[in-house]
Image (tube, grey):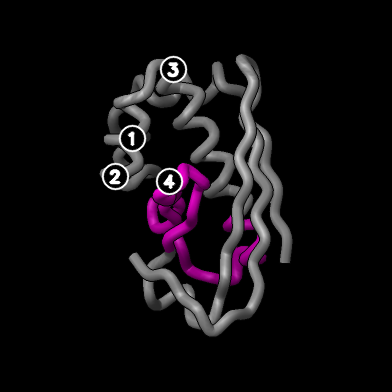
Amino acid sequence: MIGIDIVEIRRIAAAIRNRRFVMRVFHPAEIAYCESRKNRAQHYAARFAAKEAVWKALEGRRALALRDIVVEPSENGKPEIRLPASACTRLRVEVSLSHTATYAAAVALVSRSRNRRHA
């Protein structure tokens, strides 16, 4: 299953001014990561796009909030997706993020696997 999403960074920049939005959509680890970056809106936007892409790849059949889909950097910097244990039974999720000064985009691929990563 494949999902894709693109967002305007200025739209996310406006949204993250609302702390309630940030707390509802992003995991504390994501907030810490994005707040530590120079262009925080760009990083929030890329993570938002990744969450949407994963949710689409899961075909919306899973009862997941966007905050349940956690985007975190691996040791080599590649983004990884962490899902709650109840949602990721035998699922493997791959994600690719990209951004410019104007847009952030993400593509997610969800497949069956014996390897699992849990929140």
At horizontal 48% and vertical 81% (from top left) the residue drawn is: 89
Tell me the SS state at disc 4.
Answer: strand
Given the image, on which type of amino acid does mark 3 rest? Asn
Given the image, on which type of amino acid does mark 2 rest? Ala
Distance in Å between CA atoms under marks 2 and 3: 17 Å
| x, y percent for residue 97 | 61, 40
Report which residue position mark 3 lands on. 39
Check if mark 3's residue and mark 4's residue have beta carbons within 8 Å: no
The magenta stretch is: 54-82
Distance in Å between CA atoms under marks 2 and 1: 6 Å
Whichever of callouts 2 and 3 sits on the residue coming sooner in the sequence is 2
Residue 66: which numbered mark, if any? none
Q: Is residue 20 above or below residue 54?
A: above
Report which residue position mark 2 lands on. 29
Q: Mark 4 against mark 2, which lies toward the viewer?
A: 4
Q: Look at the image and tell me in which quarter the N terminus lies.
A: bottom right
Quarter location, residue 21: top left
Check if mark 2's residue and mark 1's residue have beta carbons within 8 Å: yes
Q: Look at the image and tell me in which quarter the C terminus lies.
A: bottom left
Check if mark 4's residue and mark 2's residue have beta carbons within 8 Å: no
Residue 54 lies left or right of residue 20; in this view the side is: right
Distance in Å between CA atoms under marks 1 and 4: 9 Å
Q: Mark 1 against mark 4, which lies toward the viewer?
A: 4
Q: Is residue 107 above or below residue 1?
A: above
Given the image, on which type of amino acid does mark 1 rest? Tyr
Distance in Å between CA atoms under marks 4 and 2: 10 Å
Pointer 3 local density, CA inside 10 Å: few below 14, some 14–19, many at least 20? few
Distance in Å between CA atoms under marks 1 and 3: 11 Å
Could you tell me how many numbered marks the image carries? 4
Report which residue position mark 4 lands on. 73
Pointer 4 local density, CA inside 10 Å: few below 14, some 14–19, many at least 20? few
Residue 33: which numbered mark, if any? 1
